């Protein structure tokens, strides 16, 4: 039995700390995903909160969850899309104008350390300038370290569709990097 499954069983038996242990490592990435879709700090927090509530309810109703991480990210994605559809007139704030969101997006994780610190904000800004069809898979694959299979579960798309979106997204990002003279040479050679 995996650690996730042990924690899920502990939640069902009333262990108050088990849910926190289960989701703690996922919250920063969940927020980044929601923020990328919604581009609003408050709405992203709402989406993550809704996903947390829904996941707790599902666990307590004994829903079978085999891969909690992928399932939870799928839930965050779904709640973000729900909010996006309901709030089509959301005022989008630029990430540079929202230091709290920028801080959360730059929270230290193993994936973040792999990217040069001095180019992180430029890369995120370029990725966020792309359409969601390409930016979300790139964020999940390169920044969150999820596999193609996990991303396909989260986005409810076929693995080949995700591969195609990643490939096209990399090409678009490459073009953006070429067009952006402020972007350091090291970023252009990063290989995304």
Image: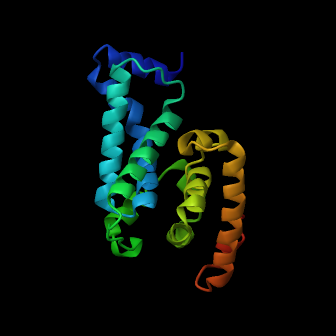
- Could you tell me which residue is drawn at 43 percent across and 40 percent down? 75
- Could you tell me which residue is drawn at 42 percent across and 21 percent down? 63
Is 11 or 78 nearer to us in this picture? 78
Q: Is residue 95 visible?
A: yes
Is 79 or 24 nearer to us in this picture? 79
Protein image colouring: rainbow
Is 189 or 64 nearer to us in this picture? 64
- Could you tell me which residue is drawn at 67 percent across and 70 percent down? 172
- Residue 178 at what x, y percent from top left? 69, 80
Q: Is residue 91 above or below residue 13?
A: below
Q: Is residue 192 visible?
A: no
Q: Which quadrant would residue 155 be assigned to in this image? A: top right
Q: Is residue 86 above or below residue 183?
A: above
Left or right placement of residue 162 versus residue 84 in this view: right
Say which quadrant the C terminus sits in: bottom right
- Residue 105 at what x, y percent from top left? 43, 59
Q: Total number of numbered labels?
A: 0
Left or right placement of residue 189 versus residue 117 in this view: right
- Residue 127 at what x, y percent from top left? 56, 67
- Residue 153 at what x, y percent from top left? 58, 38
Q: Residue furthest bottom?
A: 181
Q: Is residue 158 above or below residue 129?
A: above
Say which quadrant the N terminus sits in: top right
Q: Is residue 188 above or below residue 132?
A: below
- Could you tell me which residue is drawn at 67 percent across and 57 percent down? 165
Q: Which quadrant would residue 157 be assigned to in this image? A: top right
Left or right placement of residue 177 versus residue 67 in this view: right
Q: Which quadrant would residue 8 be assigned to in this image? A: top left
């Amino acid at each position: 039995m995996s650690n996730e499954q042990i924690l899920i069983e502990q939640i069902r038996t009333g262990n108050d700390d088990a849910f926190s242990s289960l989701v703690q490592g996922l919250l920063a990435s969940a927020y980044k995903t929601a923020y990328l879709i919604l581009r609003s700090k408050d709405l992203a927090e709402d989406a993550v909160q809704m996903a947390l509530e829904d996941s707790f309810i599902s666990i307590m109703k004994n829903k079978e969850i085999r891969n909690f991480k992928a399932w939870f990210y799928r839930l965050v994605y779904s709640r973000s899309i729900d909010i996006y559809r309901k709030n089509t007139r959301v005022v989008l704030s630029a990430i540079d104008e929202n230091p709290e969101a920028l801080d959360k997006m730059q929270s230290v994780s193993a994936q973040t350390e792999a990217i040069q610190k001095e180019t992180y904000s430029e890369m995120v800004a370029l990725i966020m300038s792309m359409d969601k069809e390409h930016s979300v898979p790139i964020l999940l694959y390169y920044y969150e370290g999820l596999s193609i299979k996990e991303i396909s579960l989260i986005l409810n798309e076929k693995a080949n569709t995700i591969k195609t979106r990643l490939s096209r997204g990399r090409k678009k990002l490459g073009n953006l990097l070429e067009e952006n003279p402020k972007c350091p040479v090291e970023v252009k050679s990063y290989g995304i």
